[in-house]
Image (cartoon, rainbow, N blue to C red):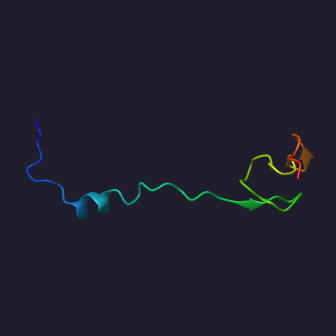
Amino acid sequence: MAVPKRRTSKRKKRARNTHKIAPAIVIQTCPQCGTMKRPHRVCLECGYYAGEQRVAGQEA
């Protein structure tokens, strides 16, 4: 059975795991009302998606 001979140092472990970070969340402006929203999702403020009213927006 394979057993590590030495303990893996923090430097080795962290260097190996550098690519395992969460991607940054992308934020865009809504073309309808100008608020910030995530792409490919209905705007929470106005309720528009792809130029059409999909859901009722929040009342200000």
Coordinates of residue 28 in the picture (x, y in percent): 74, 61
Q: How many marks?
A: 0
> Is 55 in front, or is 17?
55
> Is 57 in front, or is 5?
57
Q: Residue furthest right?
A: 52
Q: Is residue 41 left or right of residue 55?
A: left
Coordinates of residue 48 in the picture (x, y in percent): 87, 48
Q: Is residue 54 left or right of residue 36?
A: right
Q: Relative to 49, does residue 15 appear above or below in the rendering?
A: below
Quadrant of res 12: bottom left
Q: Residue furthest left?
A: 5
| Quarter that holds the N terminus | top left
> Is 56 in front, or is 6?
56
Coordinates of residue 45 in the picture (x, y in percent): 83, 51
**Residue at image point 26% right, 57% down:** 13
Coordinates of residue 25 in the picture (x, y in percent): 61, 57
Q: Residue furthest top?
A: 1
Q: Is residue 8 left or right of residue 49?
A: left
**Residue at image point 8% right, 50% down:** 5
**Residue at image point 87% right, 50% down:** 46
Q: Is residue 16 left or right of residue 51?
A: left
**Residue at image point 23% right, 61% down:** 10
